[in-house]
Amino acid sequence: MITIVLIDDHKNVRRGLKDLLEAEPDLEVVGEANNGREGIEIARRLRPDILLSDLMMDAMDGIAVTREVAKASGNTRTIILSVHNDSGYVTRALREGARGYVLKESGIDILIRAIRQVMTGSVYLCPALKWGGTGQQVT
């Protein structure tokens, strides 16, 4: 079972993601947070396999969350979920330890593929990224 913590400042987004992800037999959402600070605390406590974080949030953005979680919990892999299709954000997220970057406009199949590939140790970049992400595993 792949355990997931969701961080997004929109409750309905979290609820929808949780329902879609938990429809998969090997995925379980074990925690939710509406901001980065809360998400870090939940991740430290629960030590999920995957931390799925929105990029832009009040108090602490997804890149700062990624950096803190990478320091505190080496086994938790962060995937950024964002509306921002910009290579600068992707590059910053990867530098801070993100293992995946998925656009919110993508279908749930893309997000599930990202989770499963990141769990294998690969980096996943959404195929719709402007700068030519392939959606393939990156080592």
Image (spheres, rainbow, N blue to C red):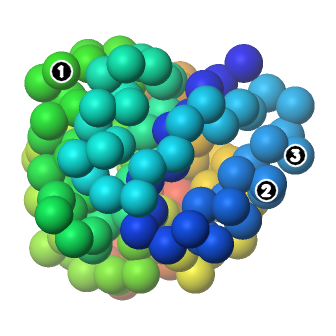
Please say whether residue 117 is visible from this viewpoint: no
Question: Separation of disc 3 and disc 1 at Cα?
Answer: 30 Å
Residue type indicated by callout 2: Leu
100 horizontally vs 56: left or right: right
Residue type indicated by callout 3: Ala
Residue type indicated by callout 1: Ala
Which residue was labeled with disc 1? 72
* Quarter of the rendering containing residue 106: bottom right
Q: Position of residue 10 (x, y in %)?
A: 49, 72
20 horizontally vs 111: left or right: right
* Mark number, residue 20: 2
* Mark number, residue 4: none
**Viewer-nearest residue: 63 or 89:** 63
Which residue was labeled with disc 3? 23
**Crowd class of label 1 (few under 14; some 14 to 19; many from 20; radius 10 Å):** some
Q: Which residue is drawn at 53% across and 58% down?
A: 135
Q: Which residue is drawn at 59% across and 61% down?
A: 14
Circle 3/circle 2 CB separation < 8 Å: yes
Please say whether residue 83 is visible from this viewpoint: yes
